[in-house]
Amino acid sequence: MAGTFTTAFSQDLVDYLCSGTTITGFTAGTMYMGLVNADPGAGGTSGTELTGGSYARVSITFGAASAADPSVATNSALVDFGTATDDWNGGTAIPGFVIFTAATGTNRIAAGTLTTAKAVTNGDSVSFAVGAVAVSLT
């Protein structure tokens, strides 16, 4: 599954690179993955993050970006959301993911769609293998 940086974060990144403006709330290498109830869209702002049933954002780490065009970075460790203790998203398929700057809050870095939307019901385990989550600038 692939995602791109959100419009807002892309603007922050350009400001940082071109004028040295600090990116509020962002610490390089510290990111959290969340699941959302809709396709986050091109700007990465759509979809509401899931709640309940032991759902919580999880820490995600990325390896070095590829030399390809476009350059892509993938998760370098298993991303494990644990086991649902109730149906997530009301048992309806979950289509999207978001990378956030913190374990709580709304500052989105990147977003995308799952390769296959998945319904998560009580007792299901949710994880993504090394290399399964990819982000790029385009």
Image: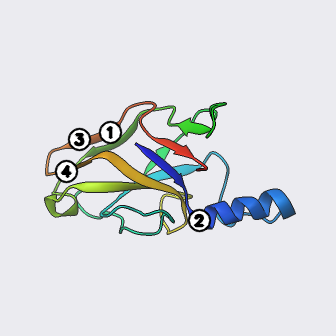
Which of the marked residues, 3 or 4, is nearer the chain's N terminus?
4
| Foreground disc of the pair 2, 1 | 2
State left or right for residue 101 relative to residue 54: right
- Asked where in the image residue 97 lies, by quadrant, the reply is bottom left
Name the residue: 37% across, 52% down. Answer: 113
> x, y (%) of residue 49?
36, 65
Which of the marked residues, 2 or 1, is nearer the chain's N terminus?
2
| Marks 3 & 1, CB-CB < 8 Å contact | yes
Mark 1 surroundings within 10 Å by alpha-carbon count, few (fewer than 14), some (14 through 19), many (20 or more): few
Q: In the rendering, which numbered label is found on residue 37?
A: none
> What residue is shown with label 3?
125
> x, y (%) of residue 42?
48, 62
| Foreground disc of the pair 3, 2 | 2
Q: State whether residue 54 appears in this view.
A: no
| Foreground disc of the pair 2, 4 | 2
Residue type, mark 4 in image? Val
Residue type, mark 3 in image? Ser
| Marks 3 & 2, CB-CB < 8 Å contact | no
